[in-house]
Amino acid sequence: MKKITPNPPAFNLFTLAPNISTEALLIQTSETLASLNAMTTDLAFELEGANRQKLLAAQQLIGLGELLVGRLLDVWVPTQESQVFP
């Protein structure tokens, strides 16, 4: 009888295209954080007490991440609205 060996575990569950642009990476990161922000906010209002407070704290950190990525996008790919005029 032949012994069946399982496949080795995958080390890269998710991969990125090697030629993806920095702008595309920043946009995808921003959209992912925005989705996570919405999910944690919705979930926080279903909880009470300390668990709610912890989730709201995590939501604030996600919001900070969104602001940081947004600023990077403004610097990397400036738009008419993001440029500061003297």
Image (cartoon, rainbow, N blue to C red):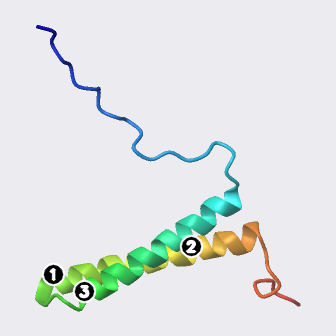
In terms of sequence position, does the residue under pointer 2 or pointer 1 come before the other? 1
Bin the neighbour count of mark 2 within 10 Å (Cα to Cα): few under 14, some 14-19, many 20 and up.
Answer: few
Q: Rounded to the nearest whole Å, what is the CA distance between mark 2 and mark 1?
A: 26 Å
Would you say 76 lies left or right of 63 here? right
Residue 29: give x, y in percent of width and height: 54, 65
On-image quarter of the C terminus: bottom right
User: Which amino acid is tagged 1?
Assistant: Asn
In terms of sequence position, does the residue under pointer 3 or pointer 2 come before the other? 3
User: Which amino acid is tagged 2?
Assistant: Leu
Q: Do the residues labelled 1 and 3 touch (CB within 8 Å)?
A: no
Q: Are marks 3 and 2 in contact (CB under 8 Å)?
A: no
Q: Which residue is drawn at 81% across and 83% down?
A: 83
Position above or below: 57 against 33:
below
Which residue position is annotated with label 3? 44
Say which of 21 and 56 sits in front.
21
Task: Count the marks.
Answer: 3
Which residue position is annotated with label 2? 68
Q: Quadrant of residue 72?
A: bottom right
User: Which amino acid is tagged 3?
Assistant: Ala
In terms of sequence position, does the residue under pointer 1 or pointer 3 come before the other? 3
Say which of 14 and 71 sits in front.
14
Q: Of helix, strand and loop, which one carries label 2? A: helix
Which mark is in front, 1 or 3?
3
Bin the neighbour count of mark 1 within 10 Å (Cα to Cα): few under 14, some 14-19, many 20 and up.
Answer: few
Q: Of helix, strand and loop, which one carries label 1? A: helix
Which residue position is annotated with label 1? 51
Q: Are marks 2 and 1 in contact (CB under 8 Å)?
A: no
Residue 12: give x, y in percent of width and height: 42, 39
Q: Residue at x 56, y 47 (%)?
A: 16
